[in-house]
Amino acid sequence: MKLQCKFLPQEDGRCGWYETLPPPPPATPLRGEVKADWVVLGAGLAGLAAARRLAELQPEASIALVEARRIGFGSAGRNSGFMIDLPHDLSSHDYTGERERDLRQIRLNRGAIDYMRETVRRHGIDCDWREEGKLHGAARKQGVRSLQAFAAGLSSLGESFRELDADEMEAATGTRFYLAGLHAPGCVLVQPAALVRGLGQTLPENVRVFEESPVQHIEVGSPHVLITAQGRLTAPRLVLANNAYAAQFGQLGLKGRLLPIYTYASLTRPLDADEAVRLGGEDSWALIPADPMGTTVRRLADGRLCIRNSFTYNPRISTSSGQLARVRAAHRRAFARRFPILPNVTFDYTWGGALCLSRNGGRPFGEIAPGVYSALCQNALGLTGGTIAGKLVAEHALGVESELLDIMRAQPEPAANPPEPLLGLGVRSALAWKELQAGIER
Ligand SMILES: Cc1cc2nc3c(=O)[nH]c(=O)nc-3n(C[C@H](O)[C@H](O)[C@H](O)COP(=O)(O)OP(=O)(O)OC[C@H]3O[C@@H](n4cnc5c(N)ncnc54)[C@H](O)[C@@H]3O)c2cc1C
């Protein structure tokens, strides 16, 4: 079986998280013939966790981790940096769903946070790791009702949280934009590009990392062969951790089930001292909108603000300058609504990145073809979902049993969808309708 990687990771705008880091040391691309016991495709959260865990469990094995760009350049370094412990169902109106499923989700998410915390501490990874929790903010009555439903859902799950009124929201964020809010303490905040770069630089010695090595096609067989412009990587076992990019693998039954959805963020310049005083609020906070289609906001300790909104369906897994200009305008409107007292604060960076969603929240996990393992489809919870999928797929492949692994294996397969062009029409109109309904929460 031959898997074509027709759609390869692109520039997709300038990512502020990545560009505000010092330049990385030169990359080692794949050149010539390389053989390994394992090859992991994609060095995002899932690929980094899979490679690390395989290496921890099999210190004598050779593991190759192959990445199209630099580590931290892709979605794993482009996200808003919320390591979310709670359910985060974007298709719901209040993030929660069926109780037992939510409880299982929380266990997986916390398993990921524990593993990441231990890795970050052990290696001293400098990624602005903050155990500060997240705010949820509602800007209108409908949002307040969604927050109340979220609070009721959290109570039934036995989760702690604190409700905030408009004054308390202003004290935290500096803006009067939010009518009400809620603080959930278990979310960890990170600088995502610094986190994944640090993970890549501290892998065990039996992992060889090949960056700037886009895999053009894969000959699935015994062994598997991954072909790049300058090299061939051969290994009997392959872990797919290329997330949205696996949506093009029709032969593995993933096409039409995995949906490559883009979302976008902008990062302002740092506020000057006057602006910081005028805004007030805490120095660092992170807010999730009451409506899942709304605007996520972070204030960073260096005085920048990060805005994220807009979802688009991009089956070619890339965005365009026109699309980036439109979302930047949407970010400006969202910024002006929340921070009218900061009219002169410009955006330094705007970028997009791919999520991988399935219609039913399912994911293909485990051995999906002989010697091919999947850690794909994080359904927007990439920091925790990708980490735990990568860690557990390694444990599954090596027979290390646990309750978390049982939970992961029991998740449903991603649901099938109608073929194109119906699929595109359906996804685009559903996203447009939900964004319209989000109103000023966006
Ligand atoms: C703006 C934005 C905000 C977000 N906010 C959050 C958030 O706050 N919290 C959260 O949990 N999630 C968030 N997400 C989602 C999160 O970033 C993703 O879910 C996460 O990155 C998925 O991790 P992954 O390792 O599965 O995939 P990815 O991070 O996409 O990694 C896949 C890797 O595979 C590589 N690859 C693909 N094809 C090839 C090839 N042919 N050859 C070699 N390499 C290849 C890619 O370059 C990429 O590095 C956000 C995403 C975006 C874009």
Image (cartoon, rainbow, N blue to C red):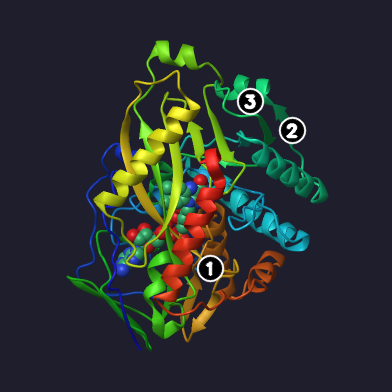
**Horizontal side of residue 196 vs 215, given as left or right:** right
What's under tag 2, amino acid-wise?
Arg
Q: Earlier in the sequence, mark 3 or mark 2?
A: 2
The answer to which quarter of the image holds residue 307 is: top left
Mark 2 or mark 1, which has the lower sequence index? 2
Amino acid type, mark 3: Met
Picture quadrant of ligand 1: bottom left
Q: Is residue 407 above or below residue 308?
A: below
Earlier sequence position, callout 1 versus callout 3? 3
State whether residue 350 appears in this view.
yes
Vertical placement of 160 versus 2: above or below?
Answer: above
**Disc 1: CA contacts within 10 A as few (<14), some (14-19) or many (>=20):** many
Above or below residue 22? Residue 423 is below
Q: Are marks 1 and 3 in contact (CB under 8 Å)?
A: no
- Kindly identify which numbered label has been placed on residue 162: 2
Give the SS element for disc 3. helix
Q: Secondary structure at mark 2?
A: strand
Kindly tell me whether mark 3's CB lies below 8 Å from ligand 1: no
The amino acid sitting under disc 1 is Ser
Query: Could you say where residue 153 lies in the image, as x and y percent from the top left?
Result: 76, 49
C-alpha distance separating marks 2 and 1: 32 Å
User: Where does the image place residue 12, in percent across and percent down from the top left?
Assistant: 29, 52
Q: Measure the C-alpha gap from mark 3 to mark 2.
A: 11 Å
Q: For mark 1, what is the residue? A: 358
In the rendered image, residue 323, in percent from the top left (x then y), is placed at: 31, 51
